Image (spheres, rainbow, N blue to C red):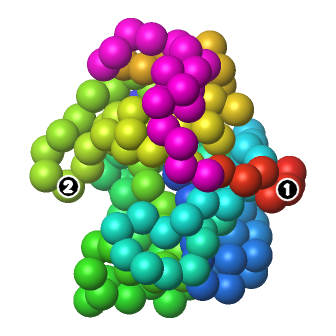
């Protein structure tokens, strides 16, 4: 049997319902399931696309032999275990939201998975914690360092982003 390649994943994690409980539980699942799990600081941001409670957001870096599609299924299972209601509109309160942001230097957009996630370039609550973990990582589409992308986005986007804690 041939050994499977280990991928490096960056996962965007957010919650605005029982935030502390759901974020910590998600991180425990990741740390107990994958090698070399690291997380960024936690940031608070306003809900986007709807009027709701503020979100806690962070990024986790993990190593896994899961393919991107296998990882997506696993992450959906973790969201479901945390009470994620998939019948609600896209922009609504969330117990837990986990997005595949990056996987190695792959580019995938097949209707199921989008890597890299477009939100990396558009949302401070995604890019800031991602660049905290890997400022010198180069975005596979723009070919720019995450730290440089953050400087550009932060200078043009005045939406508030509050550092809450380091885990």
Residue 146 shows in this picture: no
Residue at image coords 65%, 51% = 161
- Location of the C terminus by quadrant is bottom right
In this view, the residue in front, 152 or 126, is 152
Residue at image coords 42%, 64% = 48
Task: Return the residue at label 2.
Answer: 112
Q: Which mark is residue 14?
A: none
Residue 138 in the image, given as x and y percentages of width and height: 49, 14
Name, please, the residue furthest toward the top.
Answer: 143
Pointer 2 local density, CA inside 10 Å: few below 14, some 14–19, many at least 20: few
Label 2 residue SS: loop
Question: From mark 1 to mark 2, how far is it between C-alphas?
Answer: 32 Å
Residue 77 in the image, given as x and y percentages of width and height: 45, 75
Task: Return the residue at label 1.
Answer: 165
Which of the two discs, 1 and 2, labels the residue nearer the N terminus? 2
- Location of the N terminus by quadrant is top left
Residue 18 in the image, given as x and y percentages of width and height: 67, 85
Start and end of the magenta stretch?
141-160
Residue at image coords 33%, 26% = 106
Pointer 1 local density, CA inside 10 Å: few below 14, some 14–19, many at least 20: few
Residue at image coords 26%, 49% = 113
């Amino acid at each position: 049997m041939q050994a499977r390649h280990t991928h490096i994943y960056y996962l965007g994690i957010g919650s605005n319902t029982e935030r502390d409980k759901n974020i910590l539980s998600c991180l425990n699942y990741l740390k107990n399931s994958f090698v070399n799990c690291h997380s960024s600081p936690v940031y608070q941001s306003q809900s986007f696309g709807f009027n709701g409670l503020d979100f806690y957001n962070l990024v986790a870096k993990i190593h896994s032999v899961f393919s991107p599609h296998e990882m997506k299924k696993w992450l959906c299972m973790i969201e479901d275990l945390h009470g994620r209601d998939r019948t609600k509109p896209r922009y609504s309160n969330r117990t837990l939201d986990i997005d595949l942001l990056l996987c190695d230097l792959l580019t995938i957009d097949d209707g199921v998975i989008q890597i890299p996630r477009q939100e990396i370039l558009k949302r401070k609550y995604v890019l800031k914690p991602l660049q905290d973990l890997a400022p010198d990582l180069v975005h596979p589409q723009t070919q720019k360092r995450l730290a440089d992308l953050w400087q550009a986005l932060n200078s043009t986007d005045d939406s508030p982003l509050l550092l809450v804690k380091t885990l």
